[in-house]
Amino acid sequence: MRKLLLPLLLVLLAMPVLVQASVLTFRAPAGEAFYLKLDGKLVNRTASNFVRVDHLRPGKHYVEVKVRTRHRDYQLGTNVYVRHGFETNYGVDVVARKGKLKLRVLSEVPLLPPPPVVVPRVPYPPAEPYRPAPPRYGDRYDSRDRCDYLMSRQDVDRLADAMKSRSFESTKLTIAREALRNNSILAEDLKYILQQCDYESTKVEFAKYAYDYVCDRERFYYVYDVFKFDSSVRELEEYTSRRR
């Protein structure tokens, strides 16, 4: 029995590392819609300017990208490499004058949380630090508090249902702002909330408002997929660069 306990303990300790899969993302900064095959398998049946592949085996993979435009098709097949425990983000660029596609690495983001900081024990516990009241309308979260009061998926679904039940765009915007006023939100959930708005201008306005409340700002680019016009994406990119 004791001989079995040690291997079992080792497996349990290794589980957080084993379940942490690698991730690949592809996006077209200029907004072109594309199809993506990974190791010969079509990933997206509908052309999109952003594709995410979760739970991916680390190492080398073969990627095929196809962009269809009004005048011609562009295709590319190449090997990409994804590191264990990282999200690797690639950009898909159409080089029209050369008639080809180009892949470039935009960033690599670690998926594993940083190791905990060990604080030495003291004879008496420190006093509870003072925490200011949650910010009201017009206030901004400090970077160290961005993930406080994170909205759960259930909260996000309720907010989306409340917005769907309203006919006026201004009312939807008011509800969304009120819900986010004392909370923070994940980029993927913000993208879902933006999809409940009908007008491009409303989406841009709320995306700007919500940027300071996004917990994982390094993934804010997820929301770009909901915009139809490249000018909206550029406007948001310029806004967020000024906010950093």
Image (cartoon, grey):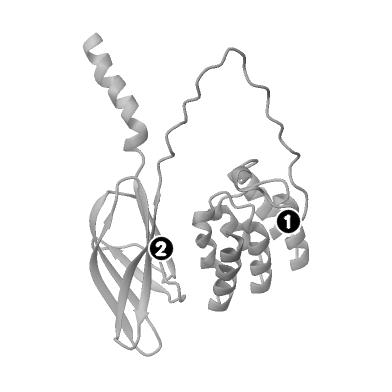
Mark whose residue sits in front, 1 or 2: 1
Name the element at disc 1: helix
Q: Nearer the viewer, residue 224 or 147?
A: 147
133 shown above or below 10: below
Q: Position of residue 1 (x, y in %)?
A: 24, 9
- The answer to whether 110 appears left or right of 57 in the picture is right
Q: Residue at x 42, y 74 (%)?
A: 33
Question: What amino acid does circle 1 point to?
Answer: Arg
Name the element at disc 2: strand
Q: Is residue 76 visible?
A: yes
Query: Quick one: label 1, few (<14), some, or many (20+) residues within 10 Å?
Result: some
| Sequence-first disc among 1 and 2 | 2
- The answer to whether 147 appears left or right of 42 in the picture is right
Q: Which residue is mark 2?
A: 51
Q: Which residue is mark 1?
A: 177
Q: Nearer the viewer, residue 204 or 167?
A: 204
Question: How many circles with numbers are drawn on the protein?
Answer: 2
Q: Residue at x 41, y 63 (%)?
A: 51
Q: Image quadrant for the C terminus?
A: bottom right
Q: Position of residue 160 (x, y in %)?
A: 66, 55
